[in-house]
Amino acid sequence: MSDENLQQRIEDAIRDPKNLGEMQGADAVGTVGSADCGDMLRMWVKFKEQDGKKIIDRATFQTFGCETAIAVASVATELIAGKTVDEALSMSGSDLSAPLGPLPPMKIHCAQLVEGALRSALAPEQAAMPVEQTLQAPAQAPSLFDQFGAATEKKVKVVLENKPKD
Ligand code: FES
């Protein structure tokens, strides 16, 4: 797949991102920050029972991330709907971004940000580098935007500048 195709798919995905926004009543929430670029992503997951199995009903996300992270989160939240926790946890960043095609090396961490947020939500005890060590109950978890505002007030430095351009 050519780079233009990839760019086109990313643009299509961010023009109409799926499952964007905080989810009220989520069963799980996970947040990660990228050590590579300082971007952040939060994912909410709701489960349901189907045929005696617990499966992912739906997932949503918010991000202070690049276009690729938004595009990957959009396709990934669609991909994981209907999967069990184990099935979703077995997916790598490249599985989750597969509908976009292979990502160039400098964008692989963008898909890993999505994978990390998903892992943080589904298996917090295994997740690497959660931004929050102690997550509040999902229903009370502040939105990423609220928290980001609070972080700014407390003068916590969050790096958003110098992001690689898409
Ligand atoms: Fe860091 Fe994409 S998530 S540049």
Image (cartoon, rainbow, N blue to C red):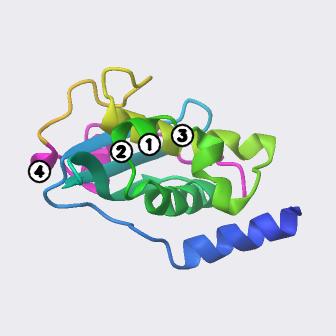
- Determine the CA span between mark 3 and mark 1: 5 Å
Mark 3 C-beta to ligand 1 under 8 Å: no
Q: Earlier in the sequence, mark 4 or mark 2?
A: 2
Give yes or no for residue 144 being in the magenta stretch.
yes
The answer to whether the residues at label 3 and label 1 have Cβ atoms under 8 Å apart is yes
**Callout 3: 10 Å neighbours few (<14), some, many (20+)?**
some
Task: Report the side of 23 relative to 117 (left or right).
Answer: left
**At label 4, which amino acid type do we have?**
Ala
Can residue 150 be seen? no
Q: Earlier in the sequence, mark 1 or mark 4?
A: 1
Counting from the top left corner in percent of width and height, residue 48 is at 20, 55
The answer to whether the residues at label 2 and label 3 have Cβ atoms under 8 Å apart is no
Residue drawn 77% across the image and 64% down it? 6
Q: Is label 4 in a helix, a strand or a loop?
A: helix
Against 51, is 156 above or below? above
- Determine the CA span between mark 4 and mark 2: 22 Å
The answer to whether the residues at label 2 and label 1 have Cβ atoms under 8 Å apart is yes
Query: What residue is disc 1 on?
Result: 88
Can residue 114 be seen? yes
- Give the magenta-colored segment's residue range: 138-166
Task: Report the side of 87 relative to 4 (left or right).
Answer: left
Query: What residue is disc 3 on?
Result: 91
**At label 2, which amino acid type do we have?**
Thr
Residue 52 or residue 38, whichever sits in front: 52
Give yes or no for residue 164 being in the magenta stretch.
yes
Query: What residue is disc 4 on?
Result: 139
The answer to whether the residues at label 4 and label 2 have Cβ atoms under 8 Å apart is no
Residue drawn 72% across the image and 56% down it? 165
Callout in the foreground (3, 4): 3
Callout in the foreground (1, 4): 1
- Determine the CA span between mark 3 and mark 4: 26 Å
Query: What residue is disc 2 on?
Result: 84
